[in-house]
Amino acid sequence: MLRAFNVRLGLRLYCVKAAKKDVKRYTDTINLPKTKFPNRLSAAKREEQERQILNNQIASAYEYQERRNLTDEKPTFVLHDGPPYANGQLHMGHAVNKILKDITLRQRVAHGQKVNYIPGWDCHGLPIELKATNASGVGSVADPLDVRQKSRKFALEAVQSQKDEFRSWGILADWQRDQIYMTFQPEFIANQLKMFYDLYERGLVYRDLKPVYWSPSSRTALAEAELEYDAKHISPSVYLRFKLNPHAGFKSIYALVWTTTPWTLPSNQAICFNSSLDYVLIKLTDRDPNNLYLIAAALVTEFEAATQLKCEIVHKFDGSLLNQLSYHHPIDREQTQLPFFDAKHVQDNKGTGLVHTAPAHGPDDFLICLSKKIPVKCFVDESGIYTKEAPDFLVGQSVLGQGNSLVLQHIAQDVVKATQLEHSYPIDWRTKEPVIVRASEQWFINTEKLKGPAAAALDQVEVYPKVNAEASKKALLNQLQKRPYWCISRQRAWGVPIPVLYRRDTGKVMVNRALIDHLCARLKSEGNMDFWWSQTLDDKLLPAEIVEGINCDLDLIVKGKDIFDIWFDSGSTWSAVLQGEQVADLYLEGYDQFTGWFQSSLLTSVAARNTAPYKALFVHGFTVDEKGHKMSKSLGNVISPKQITKKYGTDVLRWWVASHGTQNMSITVSDKLLQQSADNLSKVRGILRYLNGVIGEKQKLTQHQEDESYLNKYLLSNLLDFDAEIENLYNNYEYNRVVASIQNFIVNQVSAIYVHLIKDRLYCGNSGELAAIRQTLTHCYRHLCKTLWPIVPFLVEESWRHYEPQSDGFHTDFILADPNWRNAKSVQIVNAALDIKRLLNQQSGDANTWLLDVTVQCANPKQHELLKELQNSELCEILQVGTVSLQQPIDVELCQEAKVNLKMLNSTLCPRCRRYSLQPNDHETCFRCSLVLKATES
């Protein structure tokens, strides 16, 4: 009721109803989690935090683990780094590769194992040379010393830039002491020169004239690994006739040949057939009836379909008869007795069963002619231009330019049908221009001698992921078996020179141990191999004793101009980085390295020491956009690691790699997946923050004998299983499943079950209960950090500083699960209670379950027995109800479901804990809270 009083100052209103007493608040008596660990960071704060962690914790982690001595010492885990090219900015492929390696190393360190990891860079080769010299045309001639100096400077700058970014991702390595390797380091080159000579002495390296993939645009030989394939390349598809010499009464006979490389016809020196096939002579119904054409019987129908010409079979005979035939060269009319050769590579699935054979332009052609002692004729130079030895109408013309059309015009009367073919064709991986096969004097590794031992060594190698292991190993074996030889020489300036001399008059190779030792000594004193180009032989390059040992006059000696293939550089890194007979535990690279580094390393190691350089291979895929397209600047779909780390932070990049980088050969990069990773990591941060708040700073862990809580034992027992599961997944490189297990454990075991159910004890319980919970959650926190550190080290280190402020970092601790945590009975009991809770939740609706009186009719005696083990208070805690009573099953013989009966309690809940009902004798709080408050006051 209000009464009004008029006074000079105006109207005042007064309430005369008695005011209520202040409601007593208990907030200050609740044990709420408290921490300064922030829930989120601004971009600027996150960047500063990452920089501090890099400098203060991560920087020293590698060196610390090298020095750490543990009681149960495991063998050092060696991961040999496949060297990336020092030729530009890092892309998402680098991020996937380096972060997968780092997760692998960190998980070993977290589990008490020392690791050996020396990051490396491939510093030679055409990719670097092109960028360094900014040559508009790759074939342009430049001063070798100028090329080398510019390339070296460019590579060093690229290494520094890439190294800084790798370090910013938290990659575990000895960056402080700059413990890295580069393929242009003097000690690396010296090791390579010595290995070359050892293999040469044993006949595993040799020089020969052979057809190799040749890039006219780069003016150098290429290895298979340096090729890409243009799926829509257009080539001529031509059926030609080669005039045969009269035989067995047949006069006008022509061999039908199909080719897609007419430019190679000037070098034709034979026709190959397969004696196991049947052949026929046919007439073409709309052509001269006096002319007969030779073709494989099985390919007549295909020939008719391709040419739209009708055929009439005149005679059929066994292929073995063809070795008696000879023919006229299609261009050089003076060659009229060219041979037919039986060859297994000729098949009847395409073409005509007769193969135009030019040993200068095909591996099979070369091998068959070599066996028949047919000389190799090559009319094409380094630039893909016909030489002066070629027919006059072709001299100076480009084989890939006008070559095909000029040849076809010249032999027009012998062209039966000419069309075009769209097919997959090899191109230079750098210039993207077509390559050719061209015979040239090159250096080779004798792969025929190595294939058997290499396959046997590979049989002992584990391949991961296991789901693709069989296919991956088969792919590597197939690539190995298909390789006819490995050309290890290149015709460029930026690389390691092949350290040989030649006789000017005969071309004979001259090299010995004294020459190699002399070159290595010069290399050590000068720091690089530029002297090979800068000095002539009559300078200091060849001392008198070297010349004398070679047993040749100085004026008859010339230096080799070739450099080593970069795959020989990188393929021999194991011998420079690994110690003695050491074998790496793991090589981890993309699946393209089946034709590259995996294979080149295997061959060099088997050649040098008859063993594989690795015990296991881990193979990952390549990044694509959300539509499955390869990332490229032209498509505008490139997302760089720097963009991701700036927007989301480094740990989100790492979480994305762990989540998506191991299970698929196409690794999708999209804003959606990155945001998903950021959201997931935010939840992980939330649980770490909660745990930091509960457990506070590090305290000595003790065994609480009085802890009778089944929930505590339940979590620790599950934590033991979780720790074993995670270690197994890590050891099998299933990092996507590690991420899934972490999320599942946090969401279900930690958050939904334990943290949710013990809130009352945590917030309102007594000191003993609180200490037991803190200890349980401390174990949980430490093991979560151990599990997360390999993937998100920045987050773990940031959280760890709030747990152990005086620590130098998480890496200084060693966390082991206690086998005594195993408690199958506790797990059974709590799971039985959780089964009842699920039934209860289905029936309780929106009711405040703390006001429920629950009667449980158990499903069977076993369930009743398990639930009875729980004290009434803890069973109520798990069910989140006011009271609970248990009843035996009605019929112990029948299998039935448990039933719950719910009643509302007509009582008021304690204002402090909101759990226990107030009893008539309670003063302000429930009996439990009164005891806690009394103990606190005293």
Image (cartoon, grey):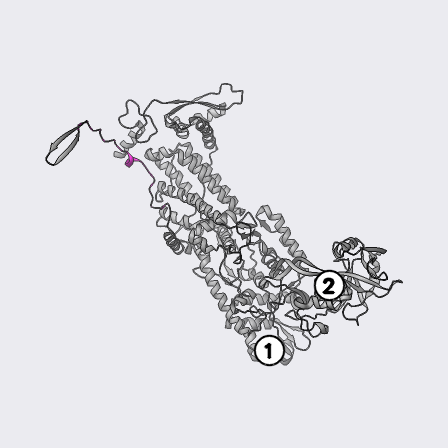
Q: Of 219 and 599, which appears nearest the observer?
A: 219
Q: Residue furthest right?
A: 249
Q: Residue furthest top?
A: 890
Determine the image quadrant of residue 532: bottom right
Q: Secondary structure at mark 1?
A: helix
Above-or-below relation of 471 to 757: below
In magenta segment, residue 367: no
Q: Residue at 42% of width from left, 52% of height from top? A: 647
Residue interval drawn in magenta: 15-38
Whole-percent x and y of residue 897?
Answer: 50, 24
Q: Which quadrant is the C terminus positioned in?
A: top left
Report the Cα–Cα distance between label 1 and label 2. 44 Å
Q: Amino acid at mark 2?
A: Asp
Q: Secondary structure at mark 2?
A: helix
Q: Is residue 523 visible?
A: no
Residue with the mark numbered 2 = 365
Q: Main secondary structure of the magenta part?
A: loop
**Mark before the other along the chain sequence, 1 or 2:** 2
Whole-percent x and y of residue 802?
Answer: 35, 47
**Residue 260 located left or right of residue 142:** right
